[in-house]
Image (tube, coloured by chain):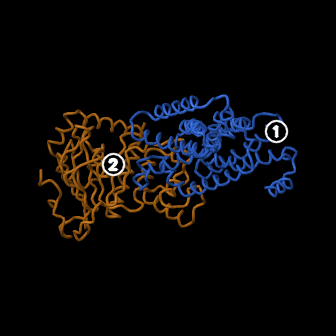
């Protein structure tokens, strides 16, 4: 499998060897919960400016991998960020968009309140300064969501909320962006918009992005690199190589997940036309 | 104090405010209701209504223990006990997988039972109902200090509390120490509840905390409206409850609760137009 890990075989020391000028290295990630081994020896090299899609069947450990990277659950292995010249600077700055933000949808909290709470020391109920207002609008502009600033969080649609959370994860600008795509609650169109914005963000800000995805069609279209996980890394390569590999179909075929999910997505895609 | 009384006589020359005990109660309402509104908005946003109710029980037991040990001023032992009690519940809540309701329920009933065993309940029945009209001018000084402390902490911690109330993981990912925020918050509520319980009473203190915030929540879409409306509802129902109780000879705390409950139901009916 080694030849598949990273275009540059992990030797990202010289600037010209890398596709981006920097990268994040994840080495030997293993997660055990009790006696159950959920992830084993995951190695990933994430180049800046690349969108890495993580796919795999249900229970493969995709979300667990993100939580381990975030440090929310205990794990073995190391994560390090290497700058453009190969200097290791330790933990990368991480931005995270959770799969589903569980919150009280009746809460009287607006999008602006959330940004003020995260970005300023002044209480969110206090009248915010013009500068801060402009900064928040700039953040929301990155995800085409300026119009949502005064909306209540609980009144946003699944796709809108996802974009607002993405905007929040991009402030301050991280080095590594972790996205856990929602399984439900976002319609097909919302999902496409989200992928387009993520693609644009990757190019504009030269981020490493890990996207846990359930939509293989969109992955094919937007990802630079696809990683198939099922307890450990099964496949790692460009979308073309991964999607033409037999093991992809074996992994999904075994659980019957691949077909059923495709059918489900098709169903979703048809709905708006009806 | 007499100067303040004179000022009150000049700006509010009303019949109901002519007695000193009514002036004291009026000042107390002006101090207590904003504090309750502030804490109430946080309690409701964090879904802690049951928790703050349990803190009242903890405060009762604290006063019981203080009295039993024979400390002349049981207030300090009560405050210490309440803080310890709230810290214990918070930690138990975070460490165990048992549902929060169960943890709080267990602590709450254990505390009230302990309190009832230690002291002769009939002697301390004032703690159950409370008497706002019994407040002394020195005690108003204590309330003033408490109110200032709450307001300062509210301003300092508001944003962090807001993040924690939305989603703990989100708060942690933005560098918030969620356990510390929770502990500060619960200790603060514990202290306020303990100090106020003798005037407001164990049975209704939680309604005074929760009702203004619950009413505000029905008709607000952002933090500014939520806090502003809760403050207005709390102060208005406090003062009008005090006046009503004077003219109709009713228990002051209970009258205040009834007024805020009426306001709550009105906002509930209006809810669909706002949210």
Q: Position of residue B154 (x, y in %)?
A: 57, 54
Q: Which chain is blue?
A: B
> Is any part of residue B186 visible from this angle?
yes
Circle 1 marks a residue in which chain? B
* Camera-nearest label, 2 or 1: 1
In front: B51, or A192? B51
Say left or right for B142 vs A245.
right
Answer with left or right where residue B167 lies relative to residue A90.
right
Q: Nearer the viewer, residue B39 or B196?
A: B196
Q: Chain of mark 2?
A: A
**x and y percentages locating residue A61 in the rendered image:** 26, 42
Disc on res. B246: 1
Residue A163 placement, left or right of A217: right
Residue at 68% x, 53% y is: B144
- Mark sitting on residue A191: none
Tell me, yes or no, if residue B274 can be seen here.
no
Chain drawn orange in the picture:
A
Q: Position of residue A261 (x, y in %)?
A: 29, 36
| The C terminus of chain B sits in image quarter | top right
Circle 2: element type: loop
Residue found 84% across the figure and 45% down from its top:
B19
Which of the pair B56/A257 is nearer the observer? B56
Same chain for labels 2 and 1? Say yes or no: no
Q: Is residue A230 above or below residue A86?
A: above
Q: Position of residue B208 (x, y in %)?
A: 65, 40
């Amino acid at each position: 499998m080694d030849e598949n890990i990273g275009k540059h075989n992990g030797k990202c020391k010289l600037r010209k060897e890398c596709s981006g000028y920097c990268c994040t290295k994840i080495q030997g990630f293993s997660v055990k919960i009790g006696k159950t081994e959920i992830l084993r020896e995951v190695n990933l090299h994430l180049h800046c400016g690349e969108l890495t899609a993580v796919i795999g069947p249900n229970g493969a450990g995709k979300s667990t991998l993100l939580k381990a990277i975030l440090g929310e659950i205990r794990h073995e292995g190391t994560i390090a960020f290497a700058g453009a010249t190969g200097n290791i600077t330790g933990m990368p700055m991480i931005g995270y968009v959770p799969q589903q933000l569980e919150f009280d949808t009746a809460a009287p909290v607006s999008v602006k309140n959330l940004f003020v709470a995260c970005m300023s020391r002044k209480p969110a109920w206090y009248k915010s300064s013009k500068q801060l207002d402009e900064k928040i609008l700039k953040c929301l502009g990155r995800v085409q969501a300026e119009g949502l600033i005064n909306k209540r969080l609980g009144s946003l649609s699944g796709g809108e909320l996802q974009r607002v959370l993405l905007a929040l994860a991009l402030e301050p600008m991280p080095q590594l962006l972790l996205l856990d795509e929602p399984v439900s609650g976002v319609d097909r169109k919302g999902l496409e918009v989200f992928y387009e914005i993520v693609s644009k963000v990757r190019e504009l800000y030269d981020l490493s992005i890990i996207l846990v995805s359930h939509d293989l069609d969109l992955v094919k279209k937007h990802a630079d690199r696809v990683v198939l996980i099922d307890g450990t890394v099964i496949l790692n390569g460009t979308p073309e190589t991964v999607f033409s590999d037999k093991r992809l179909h074996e992994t999904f075929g075994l659980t019957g997940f691949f077909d059923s999910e495709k059918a489900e997505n098709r169903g979703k895609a048809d709905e708006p036309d009806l | 104090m007499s100067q303040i009384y004179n000022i009150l006589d000049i700006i509010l020359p009303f019949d109901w405010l002519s007695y000193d005990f009514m002036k004291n109660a009026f000042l107390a309402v002006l101090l207590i209701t904003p504090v309750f509104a502030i804490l109430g908005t946080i309690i409701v946003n964090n879904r802690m209504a049951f928790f703050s109710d349990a803190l009242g029980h903890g405060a009762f037991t604290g006063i019981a223990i203080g009295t039993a040990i024979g400390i002349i001023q049981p207030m300090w032992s009560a405050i210490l006990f309440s803080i310890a009690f709230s810290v214990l519940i918070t930690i138990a809540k975070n460490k165990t997988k048992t549902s929060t309701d169960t943890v709080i329920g267990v602590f709450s009933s254990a505390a009230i039972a302990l309190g009832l065993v230690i002291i002769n309940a009939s002697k301390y029945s004032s703690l159950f109902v409370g008497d706002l009209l019994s407040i002394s001018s020195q005690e108003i000084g204590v309330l003033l200090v408490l109110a200032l402390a709450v307001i300062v902490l509210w301003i300092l911690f508001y944003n962090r509390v807001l993040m924690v109330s939305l989603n703990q993981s989100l708060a942690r990912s933005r560098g918030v120490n969620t356990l510390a925020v929770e502990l500060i918050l619960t200790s603060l509520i514990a202290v306020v509840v303990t100090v106020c319980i003798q005037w407001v009473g164990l049975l209704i203190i939680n309604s005074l905390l929760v009702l203004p915030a619950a009413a505000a929540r029905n008709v607000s879409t952002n933090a500014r409206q939520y806090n502003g409306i809760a403050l207005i509802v709390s102060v208005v129902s406090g003062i009008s409850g005090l006046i009503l109780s004077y003219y109709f000879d009713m228990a002051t705390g209970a009258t205040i609760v009834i007024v805020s409950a009426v306001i709550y139901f009105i906002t509930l009916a209006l809810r669909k137009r706002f949210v």
